Image: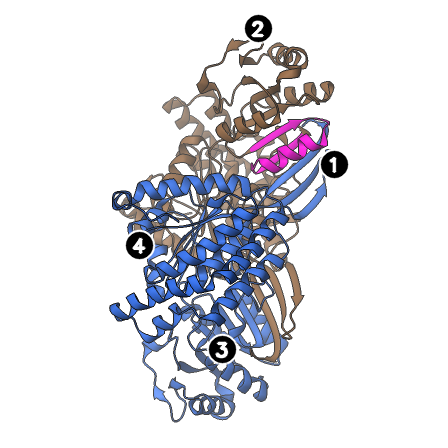
Chain colours: A brown, B blue
């Protein structure tokens, strides 16, 4: 990518409009690009990244040096870091997406009408996707690959801290596109750190069909509040686990511990434990003891040995080794609590009672509802999607883990034989 | 419905917020209402409307009298009119929607993962739909019925000219809801003609999940420009018919005439005829002669006996017995013309050549593409959807004719057996 002149950098809206037009043109070609060309581009990009790992690590070292100067937190520095193993994982991810089934052109449904018409509903790309993310350089490759697979052009706007790393990875993706004869503008990286680029993307209804923000609540909240372009996102993952009176104690202990502690910082981590009153003193107490023994701070109402919960601890995304806990009267009280405090991401029920599970499944409307399973499974890979560009809690178009398939739309292909309407 | 006090009418935003909260509460109940209750409500509404046809016609007479005073056009007065036959058609429509398959709860997909999880993708209602329409009182019943069938609460905002007619029809829908034990707020009609109600709906992201505008370009354009809530709509139906050099002449004559003249005022009517250069003087001329003989004004380039086309005649929705026509070099030129001037609604190709048809289908991205069939088939009923709330040209969520199924979202139901993530 050429380094932009200061003058050009100054006119960010004009630059973004240029990127947008190039993306639209690329999308028009990608819409009917052969599956084989997209596959070849992804494999070539993987090879290019593999060959360029020294350069990528050098670029990453620049970002790390700036990060140290700016005093980034240890967690942010860790997210930023690329080493041989992480680059290997990105390469493997590109190859995995290449190996996936191509969703474009799939006949989703087909039927005949009495008029003589044959109607097919066929999967098409959405068009142009905008991805706005924080300082994880791997998103450059993951999001770029998923958009290409689904026939969409993509405009990537990475975090300013990972500017050089993202550029180096992006160069490999472009090399892959070139070698497969696909338009280079299929995957564009915004070549400036100017925040005006983000505002331009959020308003670009002519050039961008959907925005996917990847990052913390601050970023997603800003995008949701400002965007004129539709957004696939989740603001928070305030995941609840409800342990019913008919729960199997061993399954409950295993699942609750995993849901909170496997990785406390991901959106599928449990943030609130709800326990049926009848088993609160027995199993409920044991669950809390297990959690505390694992180093979790439990902020509870009515459970021995815990810290007292404040009302604000319910409906809070800790993303840490902290969990809120509450005793509830029954499944309906659990449902009411979740409706009030949840974020429509993922909730789990532990019960052996089919009717109770059915009620929980019917009356809640989170993107993902689980029975006797850990909320940590809320992930595109664990759903068999191969990869995900994010998790959505909205109700339009995409919901739950968003993989290549959900980055598509459809059109109707109708065939007659000189057929006219009466 | 109670008649509102002037004072209450004055605070439209507060009133709309109240309607919105009531709709949300009703939607939460509707989401798990049994299919049978929704069916019973629709049948009871049909019976109530049948029984109340005198009152409905009396209310309609009031609207017609106001309409005459206001000097409405003959076309608008005709749209407004309700007689025995039209009320009978509305009743039949309610019964037809009642007889449709209930989409809610349908398992769209189900699979097992190596982790032991069983995953189901299940259809759910969207939540709350807002419908903003002009003075066709029948939309009150059609839209109300489709939203109820799909488990959505609906807020209806009818045209002010049909205020009394819509109120009378709405009362029958509410009677149906009551008799089936469903919340009355499942179908609400905005009880004021104040235009501030429309602005409030367009901004009501908390209370309304999607807006469907039904009406002319003025209404739809306003809604698309102002809405913060997502919109399912089409702004225009600039439908093209391309007659290829390999078209069957008889099929082409039949389809072109039907596509333009069956009903010139609907969104699926053809507005532009494109003719391959090789057959322009022969078949092309015959098509134009057919159209002119049927009373159509043809504004063309390079076809004998026609009016000269202005550049502004291309990409124009006439909704009248007028058609633009142009000679093009080949299918690629036709595709380029449609990309430039089309509205992504419906386009048709007339050809016996499979490769040419395939190219047209692949390279265009209208919601509906047809081969050897009339564009007038762009209609939910003709697609087997039973009824439609509108036609959408956007690429997110709903596309083409929008029936009950496309008024749904989905959630994932995941079942394990104490399953934890490694």
Secondary element at tag 1? loop
Crowd around label 3: few <14 · some 14–19 · many ≥20 (10 Å) = many
Q: Which residue is mark 2?
A: A305
**What residue lies at 64% left-to-right and 32% top-to-bottom?**
A370
Mark earlier in primary sequence (4, 3): 4
Task: Give the letter of the chain under mark 4.
Answer: B
Q: Nearer the viewer, mark 4 or mark 3?
A: 4
Q: Observer-nearest residue: B187 or A121?
A: B187
Q: Which residue is mark 1?
A: B114
Asked where in the image residue A414 lies, by quadrant, the reply is bottom right
Q: Which residue is mark 3?
A: B241
Q: Observer-nearest residue: A96 or A371?
A: A371
**What residue lies at 28% left-to-right and 52% top-to-bottom?**
B194
In the rendered structure, which segment of residues is drawn in magenta?
Answer: A346-371
Residue A86 pos. (x, y %): 58, 32
Q: Observer-nearest residue: A240 or A236?
A: A240
Residue B193: image tag = 4
Asked where in the image residue B117 lies, by quadrant, the reply is top right
Residue A77 pos. (x, y %): 47, 25
Crowd around label 4: few <14 · some 14–19 · many ≥20 (10 Å) = some
């Amino acid at each position: 990518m050429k380094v932009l002149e200061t003058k050009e950098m100054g006119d960010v809206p004009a630059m973004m409009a240029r990127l947008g037009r190039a993306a639209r043109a690329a999308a028009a070609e990608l819409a009917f690009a052969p599956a084989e060309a997209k596959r070849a581009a992804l494999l070539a990009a993987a090879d290019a990244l593999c060959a360029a790992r020294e350069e990528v690590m050098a670029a990453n070292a620049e970002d790390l040096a700036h990060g140290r100067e700016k005093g980034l937190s240890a967690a942010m520095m860790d997210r930023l870091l690329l080493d041989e193993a992480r680059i290997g994982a990105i390469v493997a991810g590109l190859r995995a997406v290449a190996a996936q089934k191509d969703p474009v052109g799939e006949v989703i449904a087909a039927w005949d009408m009495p008029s003589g018409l044959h109607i097919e509903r066929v999967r098409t790309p959405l068009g142009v996707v905008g991805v706005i993310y924080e300082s994880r350089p791997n998103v450059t490759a993951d999001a770029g690959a998923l958009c290409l697979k689904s026939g969409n052009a993509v405009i990537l706007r990475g975090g300013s801290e990972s500017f050089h790393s993202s550029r180096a990875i992006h160069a490999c993706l472009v090399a892959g596109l070139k070698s497969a004869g696909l338009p280079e503008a299929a995957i564009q990286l915004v070549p400036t750190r100017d925040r005006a680029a983000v505002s331009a993307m959020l308003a670009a209804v002519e050039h961008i069909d959907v925005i996917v923000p990847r990052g913390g609540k601050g970023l997603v909240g800003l995008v949701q509040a400002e965007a004129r372009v539709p957004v696939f996102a989740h603001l928070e993952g305030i995941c609840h686990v409800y342990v019913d009176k008919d729960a199997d104690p061993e399954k409950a202990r295993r699942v609750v511990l995993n849901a909170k502690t496997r990785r406390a910082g991901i959106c599928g981590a449990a943030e609130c434990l709800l326990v049926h009153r009848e088993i609160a003193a027995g199993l409920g107490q044991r669950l809390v003891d297990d959690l505390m023994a694992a180093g979790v701070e439990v902020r509870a109402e009515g459970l021995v040995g815990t810290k007292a919960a404040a009302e604000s601890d319910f409906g809070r995304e800790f993303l840490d080794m902290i969990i809120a806990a509450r005793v509830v009267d029954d499944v309906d009280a659990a449902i009411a609590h979740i409706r009030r405090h949840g974020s429509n991401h993922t909730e789990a029920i532990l019960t052996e009672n089919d009717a109770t599970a059915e009620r929980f499944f019917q009356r809640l409307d989170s993107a993902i509802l689980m029975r006797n399973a850990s909320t940590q499974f809320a992930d595109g890979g664990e759903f068999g999607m191969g990869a995900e560009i994010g998790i959505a809690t909205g109700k339009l178009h995409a919901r739950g883990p968003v993989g290549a398939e959900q980055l598509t739309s459809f059109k109707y292909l109708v065939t007659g034989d000189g057929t006219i309407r009466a």
